Image (cartoon, rainbow, N blue to C red):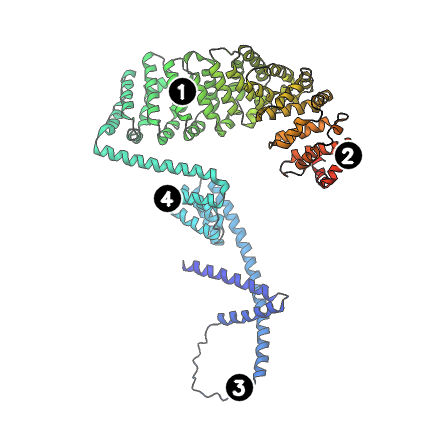
Amino acid sequence: MDKLEDFDSFLKNVDKISELVKDLNSSDVEVQQKAMGTADCYIAALDGPCRTKVNKTTINTNPPLQPSLVMTCTKGLQNESAENFMKIMERDAEERRVRRNVKAKKAAALKDMGNEAYAQEDYETAVKYYSDGLAELRDMQPLYTNRAQAYIKLGKYQEAISDCEWALRCNESCIKAYLHMGKAYQALKKYNESRNCFEKIVEIVPAREKMVKEYLTQLELEEERESQEKNAMQEFDKGEGNATRVPALLEKLSKPGQIPLYYCRGIELLSHAVTDCTGQTLFRLNNGFSIISSNDAVRSCLLQKTKDPDSQELCVSVLKLWRGICCGNEENQKMLMTCPVTRQSIVDLAISEHVAVQKDSLALLCLFSQMTHGRRLVIDNLNVHMLARNLMACILKPKQQQENTAVHILENFAAENKFCIQLRGGLTDSVIVPFTTLLTNISTSNLHVIASLISAIGCLARDEIICHSFAHDPDCWKAFVVAIRQCSACEYKEVLYPMLGLIINLSAVTSPIIQEHAVSLCECCLGLLRDSDGGVITRATGVLSTILPHSPEAVQHVIQADIVRTMHRLLKGTGQSATKYAIRTLTACTAGSHSAREELVKSDKKLSILRHLLASSCDEIVTGNAALCLAHCLECEGIASHLLGTDIVLLLLRHAAGDAKRTAVRQNAAIALGKLCRSEPRHMNKLRELHGLEVLHSCMKLIT
């Protein structure tokens, strides 16, 4: 510590001297003179007190110099001292800089060697290299944090904490130091200190909140586990209730060579003894997972090697036991999911021909799917493709009445980004094929499950890659056309409504497959526009608004079906979603067809509906499309003259000069404004009156 204080004092002196040298070189005379005085004081302070003893009673026989001569000499000495001091300091600073660069290169090389050793899991060697690097350069922060990480791997938590503290002296905002220090404190079971370290990271970098939340969750789980084990051992020591039964039953179940019914009854008794947290914890502490999974009879039934009734009953008992010991106990969930027998069997049992086995297997998976911690354990330890495939197989075979549970499990896992990422590769076989099969075989018996499944697929389609896969699958779009027609004919609205929503989301992707089926889809939606259900009409309009931009043929088809008047009528309504979809559909039609523009102008010469949307809507999509649709209509002869005397210039100008973030709205408004003034020059006078030329000029960069 004494050496450290000397080192810190030395660094402070270097900083002071560097600042002094800078002032001595200043072009400002006053600054230079002040620095010279400070330098003299500094030199005087560096010179120790004179050790020669002086007899102060001796009479000075030499007369004093004249004051003027003293001042001249002093000034000369000061000038000479300052110049020498500056040269010495500059030379010293340069030498120190060179030496530091050499040391920094050596330290960086040693750090790289330490990183390589760490990557090879040779933590002792890594520590040695990091320590050698610090011997070269004591204030190199990465060496401290890297060595702390290696110390944690070696179980030297106190040393890791010390290194993190040194790293924070080098850089008080070093989040790696707080991270490793939090881990070390957690390993030492100092949970409050660990929590403070993790929370400090969020204070420094708020963007790391998600990462910190995961560490805090793990901290809470470990703290809870320790508390559970402490309480369980206290109950065991008292010898009360089920506390003594659990170890005794596990001991009996560890006997090899018994018939399946022996283990079955023992496991049933054990299930009744682990209904609370104490029982669950004692099961884990007494090696219950290994005792059950290593039993040959249990392993055989879980892997479906024998299918006799007794083995099936034993399998059901084990699944119920697992569900009982994992309910509300995160540590037991972790233990179960890391058990090899579980990873092999639990997914396969979901499609067991034995109804009770399948039911309890799905119930166990459902338990895990309902909690974030459980979902992540499953994703990290089980085969995600096989899980999705087997869940879809359960949905395809509704005879065993487990399809609702399977859909619920799939929907829960679809909320996890990691699940979607792992599912991307085998999506077609595991999900898309069975999904399209169901869509083409809708009946009254599977309506409820298909509606729920569509919602689950919608969750999966939030993933960009999965959405792209669905959008480019030809069988999927064929199935959509078949399903819409069947649901429309049979009035299966509970399926129709979510399916149209899914189509809206998928058709946002540009795909030649969508273009190929665009006319058929639009034809189906035109029929739905006559439905009595407003929700169905809105979603059918939504499908048209996303499908039409893919296909000019589809645009011509819907125009012939009088879509312009239908959309114009919808725009008079008050529904926000219906308005958004209708104006997008109308814009798509007017963009690709002159007859559509003429039809709209014919039904509304002053384009009052479009002007109303520009004036009243706050939705960027609505106002942007209203401005663009207006620009399309201005290409019709005479329409600009009909708009004289209206507030159209003011409305467009307001949007052109609006929020800079709404680029599309500003661009479309500027285009419409330019077409308006070009078609009817009298609008230019109003534009000048409102000082709009400057605004229009500023929007030109958006248009170009």
Q: Nearer the viewer, mark 3 or mark 2?
A: 2
Q: Nearer the viewer, mark 2 or mark 4?
A: 2
- Residue 682's tag is 2
- Residue type beneath disc 2: Arg
Residue pictured at 33% horizontal, 26% vertical: 325
Q: Nearer the viewer, mark 3 or mark 4?
A: 4
Q: Quadrant of the C terminus?
A: top right
Dot placed on the residue nearer the N-terminal end, 3 or 2: 3
| Label 3 residue SS | loop
Give above or below for 460 relative to 124. above
Dot placed on the residue nearer the N-terminal end, 2 or 4: 4
Task: Give the crowd class for mark 1: few <14, some 14-19, many >=20 residues within 10 Å.
Answer: many
Dot placed on the residue nearer the N-terminal end, 1 or 3: 3
Give above or below for 388 relative to 90. above
Residue pictured at 36% horizontal, 13% vertical: 307
| Label 4 residue SS | helix
Q: Which residue is mark 4?
A: 192
Q: CA distance from mark 2 to mark 1?
A: 73 Å
Residue pictured at 54% horizontal, 64% vertical: 17
Residue 147 vs residue 126, the one in the foreground: 147
- Residue 64's tag is 3
- Residue type beneath disc 4: Asn
Q: Which residue is mark 1?
A: 362
Q: CA distance from mark 3 to mark 2?
A: 100 Å
Quarter holding residue 688 = top right
Task: Give the crowd class for mark 3: few <14, some 14-19, many >=20 residues within 10 Å.
Answer: few
Judged left or right of residue 569, residue 359 is left
Q: CA distance from mark 2 to mark 4?
A: 74 Å
Q: CA distance from mark 1 to mark 3?
A: 108 Å
Q: CA distance from mark 4 to mark 1?
A: 39 Å
Coordinates of residue 121 in the picture (x, y in percent): 45, 39
